[in-house]
Image: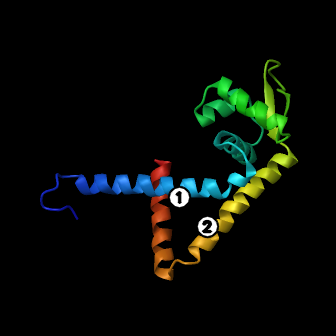
């Protein structure tokens, strides 16, 4: 509830600020738990996208990640050098390549996910049943917000 001297919408603004700060802190913590894999955020995002959506071109990945194709090319080159992705010629466009996750890339992605999952499972072990229920309700709202 807004305080008497606060302008209208101040309560919502405070909620927005707190939500941004809290989600940012959680994401940073999850990233630090998976940092042992020594992948950049961009590299990890590409591995995840290829795992979820399958083979893709540099342009497709750049568009999906909101970066320039040149930047995505550098990210893919690093992943390819590490043996985490492989390229093959595009079946209909000889100017392009399709990139896919290699077994080593899938294993690296799985390790990162496991590290994050392990930490979050342990952290949630200290949460009361009522807090878990509240978190479940909040997650439904967050999913709805992210779909809009």
Is residue 85 toward the left or the right of residue 53 in the image? right
Question: Mark 1 Cα within 10 Å, few/some/many (few <14, many 20+)?
Answer: few
From the viewer's side, name the closer residue of 16 and 53: 16
* Quadrant hosting residue 39: top right
Q: Secondary structure at mark 2?
A: helix
Q: Residue at x 79, y 34 (%)?
A: 99
| Outermost residue to the top | 95
Q: Residue at x 78, y 22 (%)?
A: 96
Q: Residue at x 36, y 52 (%)?
A: 17
From the viewer's side, name the closer residue of 26 and 94: 26
* Quadrant hosting residue 138: bottom left
Q: Which residue is mark 2?
A: 120
Rendered position, 92 above or below 148: above
Q: Position of residue 31 (x, y in %)?
A: 62, 53
First in sequence: mark 2 or mark 1? 1
Label 2 vs label 1: CA separation? 10 Å
The disc placed on residue 26 is: 1
């Amino acid at each position: 509830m807004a305080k008497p001297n606060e302008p209208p919408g101040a309560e919502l603004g405070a909620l927005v600020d707190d939500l941004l700060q809290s989600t940012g802190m959680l994401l940073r913590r999850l990233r630090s738990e998976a940092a042992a894999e020594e992948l950049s955020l961009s590299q990890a995002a590409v591995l995840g996208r290829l795992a979820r959506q399958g083979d893709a071109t540099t342009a497709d990945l750049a568009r999906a990640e909101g970066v320039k194709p040149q930047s995505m090319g550098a990210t893919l080159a690093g992943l390819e050098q590490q043996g985490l992705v492989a390229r093959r010629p595009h079946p209909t466009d000889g100017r392009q390549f399709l990139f896919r996750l290699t077994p080593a890339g899938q294993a690296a992605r799985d390790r990162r996910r496991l590290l994050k999952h392990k930490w979050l499972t342990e952290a949630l072990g200290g949460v009361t049943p009522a807090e878990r229920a509240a978190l479940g309700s909040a997650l439904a709202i967050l999913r709805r917000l992210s779909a809009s």
